[in-house]
Each structure stands twice: as structure tokens, then as C-alpha cells.
Image: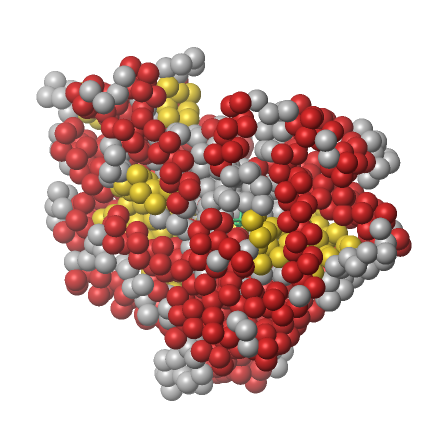
């Protein structure tokens, strides 16, 4: 690619060597791969800084409205390949390194994953940051710079073991510490009101939030935005009097308490983490971010009242919802606005994105905890709630029960502060992340709010960035598409639709197949090198990678695997399609059943993979430590994408989009964005099975007897009995008794109810696979029709319809 890296007179080769010597302090002979990685990043960073400054100066000069994306999670992954691709500098940098005898691909592979998130919600935030820069929207991401992000998963004897992931062990050359951008964040203490009604909060404890910035480069280097992550420092690093008195631990207690705020990411996905430290983290990063936004407003505009015209703050789920009260506090206590005006401005400034309808995932805090930690915010929450409930009364739209349901304070039982209600009340826009999810928000959790504010709930179907999830992770497919339809799709993913005319082109189908085959070879080599397992790249690669959760139904897939294993052994004469079942995903450390499901996958794998009677027809692989980098290797190699959640429970899913974009066919339920994927790719190019959301709701309320279903299906009965009786766990025959017992008793996730339909769908997949031609045509139609699921489209919708910046 022509020189996209600015010419400074020196060759890139020399600049990388300069960085090695001057910034790292090593010469070429002593340099280790990590040193070359850092030197390469430093060199690129210099280029990025220049564009970064141009971007922020231009936004400032234009007095542009800025978007602030507040998220407790950013699941970024590696950054080098992303920055190289977006700057168009991959070839140039590769050549410069080669001249030093260094392989770019090799150093890319040793960059640690920035895993500051659990799963889909955090990955969405990372895709959004990249799309914001790509669409040239001035934006900041705000979050926490966790020292230990998502844990590293090791599998020991089939069990998940959690280890700390030290992603900062070699330093992080991407980030810039901004010690000058620091704010005090208080906790506890008391609120003092004087005779004129002026309120002062005197916190008992204060920590310093200090900014650490990472540049986010948009596609074609158009714009560079900032991801600002907060670090924590004690206001008083050491109590010298205590130290001198010999109390060394006590002298450093403040340090420990501050650092604990940024020590770890809570490894819970779709489950509320009900810990005091979690609320401290939420307030810490919310307060620092809101103070930073207000500071920027005052610095650039000199007055506070235009804030809603200059700032759009988006809350990624309720984790930053306390920001609503924090902005109110600053507007009233620091800027002297009255309650009504502050409330009006606050609501104009915030948008809130909901990510889950699972009741156990809706955050709420015991009122005494909230009041003790944030006494001023408690007063503000009461004041907000009074305005909200008064408005509801006056509207006459809600009865008493509905008014109790929208209250920010849950009065049933132990009193709690409901963060979703605070976020809903404090935002002018509340969005779901797929069409079905948004409908269900209106019908279920937010039904009463929706009656009161019928225009507030809106849909923004999720998307993924096609840079990382196609161009970077699948060079083979990208090259082939460019040859076929030119480069237009690289700037506008919806232009992938031009590929549709090749769906029935036998020559093109052959080449698509060859690309997939090369990706499968690469994955097979990876599995052999890292796990010592051999898989046949001719087999159908059937993949379910995502967080392990009962609603995502890895168990349904595993039971079907056992059933297939039984059938292959009973009918070896049939024309079975060879399959490799690939699983990957982490379980929350406290989620017992999820961890048991991981063990079950490994127990089944051990048994099946060592059984000569299934020959090469079935292999089961649980790949440890699923993360972004592993997803980038596995997804391009997948033939079949498992998106089999209980209908009504997956808000959107984004894994489903990545697979389709890489030419996998989906087997899935009518849940989340699967429904919209089906609408885009066409009914013939996706395999849908199972109950829909209405049918699930209907079964749950009208009584459903899973025992009857299990006993009525020979295949299901045999498979679950085998698991429950210890066929796969002879060392502990009762290991899965309770897990399977739960299916007989209540089966909340409708595993039994959907089994037969799922199993039939899998056999339909087999038949389609045998029609090689038809399979390739469907794969091409998937790629051609999922450009709409680009996060560029999603962000453009947020920008126009929520933020008013496009
Ligand atoms: C995309 C992605 C997810 C989300 O996957 P779902 O299948 O939508 O749950 C989770 N983790 C990683 C690493 C991802 O890349």
C-alpha cells in the first residue's frame, strides 16, 4: 500500500530501530520479540498522535457536540493489527520489520488482549468506539483501567480454573498517562445544608481518578478518538505518622483502598454483581467521567446551560446509571442550578441502552448501602423520584401498582435503589439492542414506564465492526471479495450485497470453499499446537463460542452431541456427516451450573474422542480461554454458527453477526438479532428451530411438563439418562444428576421442549452439507446480506436519532 505513514525523511525501518534504542533502551542484537512489538507500537503511535491532535483541534474549533460513551467494560482485544489496518500501513510496517529480520505476524501474536470486559456488552463498546472514529464523530469512551481484566481460563481435568490475567506485565505502549487530568472522587461522609439552602457534601474518604488515554483510530485513519480509562490513586499515598510509628500496613491502607477500585473486573455476565466494591467502582468511574465532561464544557464554552447541545452521554447498561445523580449534583451544588432546570438538562443529555431483561441481571442496591456511600446522591435520588412519581400521578396514566413499579426506590421488602429506573427516568432515550428485545422491553420490564413515556423507548439493533471481524481476521475472504466486487464494501459494508450475484457461480463457490478450507487448516493447526488435539478439516466445523450461561443453552448442544454419538454408534452404516463440535467460553466463577457445563463438555469430549467406534465422524473440542483473539481465529473457520438461546432471553447477540459475515450458516432460535439476520439473509439461508418468544412465555405461564417431554422422546431420554447416570463421568457418576434433574423438574430454559426441533434441524444441516453447491451458495448469500449488521450502521442511527450529531 502506498505510504500512508507520514514521511519524516527517515525510513520506517530506521524509525522502528530508533524507537527500540531510544524508548526501550535495547539494540537490535539484544531485542526480544516483546521489544520489537513495543518499538513498532511506539513508531505507529507517533503517527497516530499527529492525527489525534488534528481531530481534537478540529472538533474544538467547530464547537462540535461530543459523544460520551460510558461503559464499565471495553472488550478490546489486541490493537496492533487494528491500528495497522485502519492506517493502511500493514504492508509497509511488515516490510520494515522484515528488513530487521522480524516477522510482523509473529509479533502481532504476542500482543496481550486488552480484556476489560466479559462478553457481548463490552465487545459492543469496543466496536462502537471504532465505528465512532470511522464515522468521524468526536467521541470519548470512558471506563476503568483494570489492572486485571477478564480472568484467564485454564482447563484442569475438565474443570475451569480462573487465573489472573496480567495484561500490563510488559507495560502498555498504547496508553498515555494524563496525570494532569485528575479528579477527586468522594465516598461517604455527610451532607451539610446552610441557612441559604446551599448544600455541601463532605465525603469521609476521597480518592484521585487519573486519566489514561488510548487512541482509537477509525477506518482509513480518518479520525482518532480517545478511550479514557480511569486509574485510582490515594489522595494521601502514605500516612507518615503511622509509618513512623511502625504501622507499615496501616500507613499504606489508603493506597490499597484506592487501588482496589481498579484492581479487577467483575467477571459476571448477565448477573448483577451485588458487592459494595462494585458500587464503588461504578460511582468512581461515573464521577470522574462526569466531572471531566463538565470541566470540558466550562473550558470550551464558558457556561453550563448549553451542555445538552454540546454533550450526548450514552449509558451502556445501568452500570454508569449513578451518573444521572452525579450530573444533577454538579449542576445544583457546583453550578447553582435549581432542581427543575438541572433535571431538564440532565434528561436532555443522557441516553440509556438496556442490555438484558433477565431479572437477576437488573441492578439494584440496598438503600442503606447507597445512602452510606453516597449520602448526597441519595437525597438527589429522592428528589428525582418525587418529580417522577408526581408526573406519573398527574398524567393519570398509571395506577398505584404501576407507580410503585416505576419508582426508583423498591419498597417491597428490603428497600433498594433500582438503577434501571434511575437510568430510564434520567434519559430522553432508552434503547434496546434488537427489534424483539425492544418490543419485550415495552411489554415486560418497562411496560409501565412505556405507558407514561410512550416515545422514549427505541430500537438500535447491534452491529459489529467489519474491520476487525472481516478485513483483519479473514484476509483470504477479504481478498476474494475484493477481486469479485472491488473495494467499495471496505468503506460501506452494505455493498457486500454485490456479492449476491456470485451465489450460483460454481467457480466462485469453489474459491469461497478453498478460503474456508485454508482457515479451517489454520485453526486445526492451532488446536494441534495448543491443545494437542487433531481434527479433520474436511469435517463440518460446528461452533458455539460465547459466555457459558444456561440461557445460551450449551447444554442443549451437548445433549444433542450425546444423542448424535449414540446414533452414530447404533447406525454406523448411515451416511453420517463428519462433525467437529467446537465449544469455548468462560463461566462466572460463582456460577455453579455454568462451570458444570464446562466440565460436561470436557467429559463428553474425552469419551467421544477416544472411542474408535465413531471413527472420524465426531470430535468434540472445548477450547480454553475464549477471548477476542481466539474468536478472530475460530470464526473465519466455522461452517455452522450455534445461536440457540431460549427465545426471548438473548437481547441481541453479536457473535451471530460475526459468523454470518465470515460465511458460516446459522442454526438458531427466533431470538435477539437472529430474527433480523433471518430477515436479511432469507429463510432459505438460515436454519431456524424451536419455540418463539411468545410460545416460551405461554408455556411458562400455562404450565409445562418437561418430564413428559423427555419420556416421550427416545433419543432425548437416552441422552439425558446417559449423562445423569455417569456414562461420561465414571469417576463421579452423580456429577450431573442435579443438572439433569433440573431439566425434569422445571427446565426454565426449555431445553427439553426444544430438543426434538433442534435435533431435526441438525439433521437438516447434515443434508444441506452433503449438497456442497447449495451450502456454498447459502454461505455466499450470508456474507452478501449481513453488511447491514455493521456497527457503522448502528452508530449512524444512534448519531441521528439519539445524539443529534449527524
Ligand atoms: C462477539 C463476542 C462475544 C459476544 O458473543 P455472543 O455470541 O453474542 O454472546 C463475546 N465474547 C467475545 C470475545 C466476542 O468476540
Q: Quadrant of residue 62?
A: bottom left
Q: Looking at the picture, does residue 43 appear above or below residue 664?
A: below
Furthest toward the left, the residue is 196
Instruction: Inspect this view and state whether residue 377 appears.
Output: no
Q: Is residue 730 above or below residue 778?
A: above
Q: Foreground residue, 641 or 414?
A: 641
Relative height, residue 491 to residue 398 (above, below): below
Q: Position of residue 419 (x, y in %)?
A: 37, 30
In this orientation, which residue lies closer to the viewer: 460 or 253? 460
Give the camera-side residue of 323 and 649.
649
Q: Residue at x 39, y 75 (%)?
A: 488
Position of residue 258 measured from the top left corner of the image (x, y, whole percent): 44, 37
Kindly identify the residue that appears in the image at 63 percent across and 70 percent down.
Answer: 773
In the figure, is residue 85 to the left or right of 750? Answer: left
Instruction: Indicate the quadrant containing the N terminus: top left, top right, bottom left or bottom right.
Output: bottom left
Point out the image quarter for the C terminus. bottom left
Q: Along the horizontal axis of the image, is 369 left or right of 518? A: left
- In the displayed structure image, the side of residue 271 where residue 128 appears, left or right: left
Is residue 785 placed above or below 644 in the rendered structure? below
Amino acid at each position: 500500500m502506498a505510504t500512508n505513514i507520514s514521511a519524516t525523511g527517515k525510513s520506517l525501518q530506521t524509525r522502528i530501530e530508533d524507537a527500540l534504542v531510544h524508548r526501550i533502551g535495547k539494540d537490535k542484537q539484544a531485542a526480544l520479540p516483546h521489544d520489537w512489538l513495543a518499538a513498532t507500537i511506539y513508531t505507529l503511535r507517533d503517527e497516530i498522535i499527529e492525527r489525534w491532535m488534528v481531530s481534537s483541534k478540529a472538533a474544538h474549533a467547530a464547537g462540535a457536540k461530543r459523544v460520551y460513551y460510558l461503559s464499565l467494560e471495553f472488550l478490546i482485544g489486541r490493537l496492533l493489527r487494528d491500528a495497522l489496518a485502519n492506517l493502511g500501513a500493514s504492508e509497509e510496517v511488515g516490510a520494515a520489520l522484515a528488513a530487521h529480520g522480524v516477522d510482523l505476524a509473529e509479533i502481532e501474536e504476542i500482543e496481550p488482549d486488552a480484556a476489560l470486559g466479559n462478553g457481548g456488552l463490552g465487545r459492543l463498546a469496543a466496536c462502537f468506539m471504532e465505528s465512532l472514529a470511522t464515522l468521524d464523530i468526536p467521541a470519548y469512551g470512558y471506563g476503568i483501567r483494570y489492572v486485571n481484566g477478564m480472568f484467564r481460563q485454564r482447563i484442569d481435568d475438565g474443570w475451569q480454573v480462573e487465573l489472573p490475567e496480567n495484561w500490563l506485565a510488559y507495560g502498555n505502549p498504547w496508553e498515555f498517562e494524563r496525570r494532569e487530568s485528575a479528579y477527586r472522587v468522594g465516598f461517604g461522609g455527610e451532607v451539610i445544608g446552610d441557612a441559604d439552602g446551599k448544600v455541601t457534601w463532605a465525603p469521609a474518604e476521597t480518592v484521585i481518578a487519573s486519566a489514561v488515554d488510548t487512541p482509537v483510530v477509525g477506518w482509513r485513519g480518518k479520525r482518532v478518538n480517545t478511550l479514557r480509562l480511569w486509574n485510582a490513586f490515594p489522595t494521601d499515598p502514605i500516612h507518615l505518622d503511622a509509618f513512623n510509628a511502625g504501622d507499615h500496613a496501616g500507613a499504606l491502607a489508603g493506597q490499597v483502598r484506592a487501588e482496589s477500585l481498579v484492581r479487577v473486573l467483575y467477571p459476571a455476565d448477565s448477573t448483577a454483581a451485588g458487592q459494595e466494591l462494585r458500587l464503588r467502582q461504578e460511582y468512581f468511574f461515573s464521577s470522574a467521567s462526569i466531572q471531566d465532561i463538565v470541566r470540558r464544557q466550562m473550558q470550551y464554552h464558558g457556561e453550563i446551560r448549553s451542555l445538552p447541545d454540546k454533550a450526548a452521554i450514552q449509558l451502556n447498561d445501568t452500570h454508569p446509571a449513578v451518573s444521572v445523580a452525579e450530573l444533577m449534583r454538579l449542576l445544583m451544588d457546583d453550578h447553582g442550578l435549581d432542581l427543575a432546570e438541572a433535571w431538564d438538562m440532565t434528561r436532555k443529555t443522557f441516553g440509556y441502552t438496556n442490555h438484558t431483561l433477565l431479572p437477576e441481571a437488573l441492578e439494584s442496591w440496598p438503600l442503606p448501602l447507597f445512602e452510606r456511600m453516597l449520602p448526597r446522591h441519595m437525597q438527589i435520588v429522592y428528589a428525582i423520584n418525587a418529580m417522577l412519581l408526581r408526573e406519573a400521578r398527574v398524567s393519570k396514566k398509571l395506577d398505584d401498582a404501576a407507580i410503585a413499579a416505576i419508582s426508583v426506590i423498591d419498597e417491597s421488602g428490603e428497600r433498594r435503589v433500582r438503577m434501571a429506573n434511575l437510568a430510564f427516568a434520567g434519559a430522553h432515550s432508552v434503547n434496546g439492542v434488537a427489534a424483539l428485545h425492544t418490543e419485550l422491553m415495552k411489554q415486560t420490564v418497562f411496560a409501565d414506564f412505556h405507558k407514561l413515556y410512550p416515545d422514549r423507548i427505541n430500537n438500535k439493533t447491534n452491529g459489529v465492526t467489519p474491520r476487525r471481524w472481516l478485513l483483519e481476521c479473514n484476509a483470504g475472504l477479504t481478498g476474494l471479495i475484493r477481486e469479485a466486487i472491488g473495494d467499495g464494501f471496505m468503506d460501506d459494508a452494505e455493498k457486500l450485497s454485490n456479492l449476491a450475484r456470485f451465489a450460483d457461480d460454481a467457480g466462485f463457490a469453489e474459491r469461497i470453499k478453498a478460503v474456508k478450507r485454508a482457515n479451517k487448516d489454520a485453526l486445526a493447526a492451532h488446536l494441534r499446537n495448543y491443545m494437542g488435539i487433531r481434527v479433520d478439516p474436511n469435517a463440518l466445523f460446528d461452533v458455539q463460542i460465547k459466555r457459558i450461561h444456561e440461557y445460551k443453552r450449551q447444554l442443549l448442544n451437548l445433549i444433542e452431541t450425546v444423542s448424535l454419538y449414540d446414533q452414530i454408534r447404533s447406525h454406523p452404516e448411515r451416511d453420517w456427516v463428519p462433525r467437529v463440535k467446537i465449544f469455548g467460553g468462560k463461566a462466572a466463577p460463582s456460577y455453579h451450573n455454568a462451570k458444570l457445563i464446562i466440565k460436561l463438555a470436557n467429559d463428553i469430549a474425552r469419551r467421544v474422542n477416544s472411542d474408535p467406534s465413531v471413527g472420524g465422524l465426531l470430535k468434540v473440542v472445548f477450547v480454553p480461554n475464549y477471548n477476542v483473539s481466539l474468536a478472530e481465529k475460530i470464526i473465519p473457520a466455522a461452517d455452522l454458527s450455534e445461536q440457540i438461546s431460549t427465545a426471548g432471553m438473548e437481547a441481541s447477540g453479536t457473535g451471530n453477526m460475526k459468523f454470518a459475515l465470515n460465511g458460516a450458516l446459522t442454526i438458531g432460535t427466533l431470538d435477539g438479532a437472529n430474527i433480523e439476520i433471518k430477515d436479511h439473509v432469507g429463510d432459505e439461508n438460515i436454519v431456524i428451530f424451536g419455540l418463539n418468544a411468545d410460545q416460551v412465555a405461554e408455556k411458562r405461564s400455562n404450565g409445562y411438563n418437561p418430564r413428559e417431554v423427555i419420556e416421550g422422546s427416545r433419543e432425548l431420554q437416552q441422552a439425558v439418562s446417559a449423562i445423569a447416570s455417569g456414562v461420561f463421568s465414571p469417576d463421579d457418576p452423580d456429577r450431573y444428576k442435579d443438572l439433569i434433574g433440573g431439566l425434569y423438574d422445571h427446565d426454565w430454559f426449555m431445553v427439553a421442549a426444544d430438543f426434538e426441533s433442534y435435533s431435526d434441524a441438525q439433521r437438516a444441516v447434515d443434508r444441506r452439507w452433503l449438497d456442497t453447491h447449495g451450502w456454498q451458495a447459502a454461505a455466499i448469500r450470508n456474507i452478501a446480506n449481513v453488511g447491514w449488521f455493521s456497527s457503522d450502521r448502528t452508530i449512524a442511527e444512534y448519531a441521528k436519532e439519539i445524539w443529534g450529531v449527524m
